[in-house]
Image (cartoon, rainbow, N blue to C red):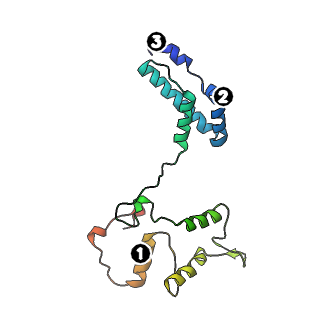
């Protein structure tokens, strides 16, 4: 360590001193002590590096710690515009949901639900009961089944429509999706 930097390094506050700031105390209440302590330590580490590199006293440590808490707690997902020409693009979060669908999910999703529970009988139910009849009505089909991924849907469709027959697939479509489905 260069001796000329020693006074600046000694002048840095401790983590506890930073945590004494009212703003950071409020962040502890909001995000928990462990995360805010981490942000303070990282801020002080960066301040030490800055002193060693520039020889100048770092400013606004509380604000820098606040910014670090924001960085640690902010979502890395952001809304984007799909300009790819692919309607349901798997790298862009699949199909968008309508406001009504999101509101319905939020209403049920904040607590427990009867997803696989038949309330009248008090017995285990089927998650398909909630959507199969609606899908059959919407499509005019006799019955319907919902699965949660394209691989399952493809296997069901091929099993029903091409059982015992060969299925020709373009080489360009021979891709592997997560989990080894080809």
Tell me, for residue 4, which label it has, or none. Answer: 3
What residue lies at 55% left-to-right and 17% top-to-bottom? 10
The answer to which image quadrant residue 163 occupies is bottom left
Q: Is residue 144 above or below residue 86?
A: below
Q: Which residue is mark 2?
A: 20
Q: Residues within 10 Å of mark 1 (few under 14, many from 20)?
A: few
Q: Which residue is mark 1?
A: 154
Which quadrant: the N terminus?
Answer: top left
The span from disc 2 to disc 3 (Cα, nearest Å) is 29 Å
Q: Position of residue 65 (x, y in %)?
A: 55, 33
Q: Position of residue 118 (x, y in %)?
A: 68, 76
Question: Could you tell me residue 182's position as x and y percent?
Answer: 36, 68
Which numbered disc, 2 or 3, marks the residue that appears first in the sequence? 3
Which quadrant of the view contains residue 99? Answer: bottom right
Task: Decide which of 43, 165 is in the foreground and name it.
Answer: 43
**Going from the N terminus, do you reach mark 3 or mark 1 first?**
3
Q: Secondary structure at mark 2?
A: loop
Lower sequence index among marks 1 and 2: 2
Secondary structure beneath label 3: helix
Q: Looking at the image, do the residues carrying marks 2 and 3 touch, with CB atoms under 8 Å apart?
A: no
Residue toward you, 163 or 98: 98
- Disc 1 versus disc 2: nearer the observer: 2
Residues at marks 1 and 2, CA–CA distance in whole angstroms: 59 Å
Seen in the picture, residue 73 relative to 132 is either above or below; the reply is above
Horizontal arrangement in the rendering, residue 39 relative to residue 21 (left or right): left
């Amino acid at each position: 360590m260069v001796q000329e930097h020693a006074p600046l390094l000694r002048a840095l506050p401790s983590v506890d001193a930073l945590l004494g700031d009212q703003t950071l105390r409020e962040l502890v209440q909001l995000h928990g002590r462990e995360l805010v302590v981490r942000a303070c330590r990282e801020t002080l580490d960066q301040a030490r590096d800055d002193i060693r590199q520039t020889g100048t006293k770092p400013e606004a440590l509380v604000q820098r710690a606040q910014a670090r808490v924001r960085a640690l707690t902010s979502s890395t997902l952001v809304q984007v515009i799909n300009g790819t020409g692919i309607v349901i693009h798997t790298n862009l979060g699949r199909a968008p949901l309508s406001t009504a669908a999101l509101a319905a999910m939020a209403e049920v999703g904040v607590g427990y639900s009867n997803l696989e529970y038949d309330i009248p009988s008090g017995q285990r139910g089927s998650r398909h009961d909630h959507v199969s009849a609606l899908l059959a009505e919407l499509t005019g089909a006799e019955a319907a089944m919902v699965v949660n991924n394209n691989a399952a849907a493809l296997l069901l469709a091929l099993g029903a429509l091409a059982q015992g027959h060969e299925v020709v697939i373009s080489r360009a479509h021979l891709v592997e999706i997560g989990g080894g489905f080809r």
